[in-house]
Image: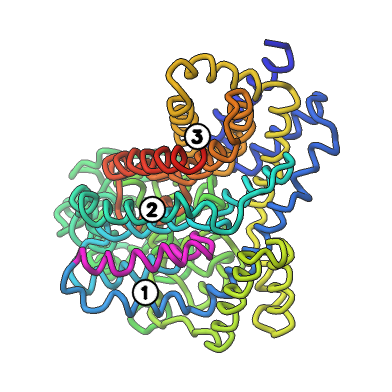
Amino acid sequence: MTFEIAFVLIVLLLMMVGLIFEIARPDFILFLTLTVFLLSGIITTEEALRGFSNEGMITIALLFIIAGAIQKSGIADRIVTKLLGNGKSDRLTLLKVLFPIAGFSGFLNNTPIVVTLTPIFKKWCTDHGISPSKFLIPLSYATVLGGTMTLIGTSTNLVVHGMLLESGQEGFSFFQLGVVGVPATIIGILYIVTIGYRILPNHKVMTETVKEHSREYLAELIVEPNFSHIGNTIKEAGLRSLKGLFLIEIIRDNDRIYPVKSTTKLKSGDRLVFTGLISTIAELQHKKGLRLETGSEMTLDTLKNGAAQLVEAVVSNNSTLINKKIKHTNFRSKFDSGVIAVHRNSERVKSKIGDITLKAGDTLLLLCGADFPKKIESTSDFYVTTQLDTPPILENQKKGWLSLFSLLFMVLLVTLNIISMLKAMALVVVFLIIAKVITAEEIKRSIQFNVLLLVASAFGVGIAMLESGTATWIAKGLVNIGEPLGVIAVLTSIYLVTNLFTEIITNSAAAVIMFPIGMEVANQMSVDPISFVVAITIAASAGFSTPIGYQTNLIVYGPGGYKFSDYLKVGIPLNILIMIVTIIIVNLVWIN
């Protein structure tokens, strides 16, 4: 092991630690890693910038635009809503919708699909007396599986495609990954609606939990000077034996009083932190001198006249709110809303509302004004998961179909090898702009710049592994250990390591780290490199066992009321199943 290899391994280890413990956003961590390699001389400036002009990265940017144009039309939403039907059989309904959803995910970005369909699924489940936790993880998993069927199914596929081109290989054809992806998707969905459905929890959704068990949520009332019970005890004020409500603590100046005793006397300015029913809190604020703290002038009374509405929103993993206290986020001015309650992984957040430091996946119950939908349009702070009282206005349906047919035309051009993927996508984007299907503002909103930074930086990190000899060194170690057991054993170990990485960091980062290793292993074993690359690409997308393994898993985490262990129970068997399918097909098609 040379000094350069040791240095690269240490930096990669620190990068992994940063990604696992979410010290900062993944794109920033990878960009920082790239900068370290550049400043240390491991890679040149040209090599560091290569990812920013890579065909795969630019293709991803164009795909975001096309997917955004189709997504806003609501075509997919209407099709899925129609397929849900009357729900005579839970599993049959699930089977009917998961295959089309997986099909959509093969051609569209799966994140907006899950964001859009989560409220539709949730409302349908509520209307039919079914727990959304039985449907939302399957929704996420179906989009993940569907993304393995085509070249444009996920950004990870395009990242690996770009790296293949960078290394002098041909790259994937449009449906090449489908050789593994289609059988894996069919088998995966059949598992989800049979064995998986039994394992899935029967959690109640946030609104039901607020109504029935709401010890997991927080609300805050302020004692104003005109409260008639100032100087009286909690018991005398009638705040001890409230139906469906529990007083956790009192914040008095800089002191915190907990547990709260019945004999504790109230003072003006006390902040009473309750957990309990929203309805009871609404009744409680009718007591003169008690004011609900929402971070704005809105109160629950505004719900009655339609001036405000309750919205459930999940903090995204790209949110600017992460690691900030609610009181420091300017919620009122920024989003025209106030935070009423916070839910985090089925645990009670022991802090007053303003002092809660937000994390990705937190579910917020918001009291929102009329401008809330407009204010969140240009941000990626939330995955909004509860439908507004008034349905969104659908875009022109003709434009929606035009976008969809443009995508299909692009697929046809690429499949017939008439033009390259990049040229086909560029052509479609130009056409959509000329036809006024999308505007410049919509293009800006569609492109996820943080993903592009992550992908571009990841290319540079991969180059550093190759140029320093780190990939070769790791590959030799894997070959020496696995070669006596055969190619299948080495392929399985590569798949498992990639899959482990994608569960604890990001899928694109996992693919980038393992790509150069897989290429080196294949060369040393005189095997077609595409066999290992396909296995790595599928493994990098098959993130089922943790909510952080794939972005869509995080989106449904709060709305489904899931626990971390729920993903382990239903996801690990699916991970193993997809691995077996992948190894068998890769062996039959590319190795034997």
Magenta residues (range): 90-115
- As measured in the structure, the alpha-carbon distance from the residue carrying label 3 to the one carrying label 1 is 33 Å
Residue at far right of view: 45
Tell me how many marks there are: 3
Secondary structure type for disc 1: helix
Specify the principal SS of the magenta part.
helix
Q: Nearer the viewer, residue 103 or 17?
A: 103
Specify whether residue 52 is in view: yes
Q: What secondary structure is marked by label 2?
A: helix
536 sits left or right of 578 in the view: right
Category of crowding for the residue at label 2, using alpha-carbon neighbours closer than 10 angstroms: few (below 14), some (14–19), many (at least 20): some
User: Which mark sits nearer the N-terminus, 3 or 2?
Assistant: 2
Residue placed under numbered mark 1 in the picture: 80
Mark 1, other Cα within 10 Å: few <14 / some 14–19 / many ≥20: some
Residue 342 visible, this angle: no
Mark number, residue 183: 2
Q: Give neighbour class at mark 3: few <14, some 14-19, many 20+ (Cα, 10 Å).
A: many
Q: Is residue 344 magenta?
A: no
Q: Position of residue 325 (x, y in %)?
A: 51, 47
Kind of residue at disc 3: Thr
Task: State which mark lies toward you, 2 or 1.
Answer: 2
Pointer 3 residue: 498
Q: Amino acid at mark 1?
A: Val
Left or right of residue 472, residue 38 in this image: right
Q: Nearer the viewer, residue 431 or 361?
A: 431
Secondary element at image label 3: helix
Identified by mark 2, the residue type is Pro
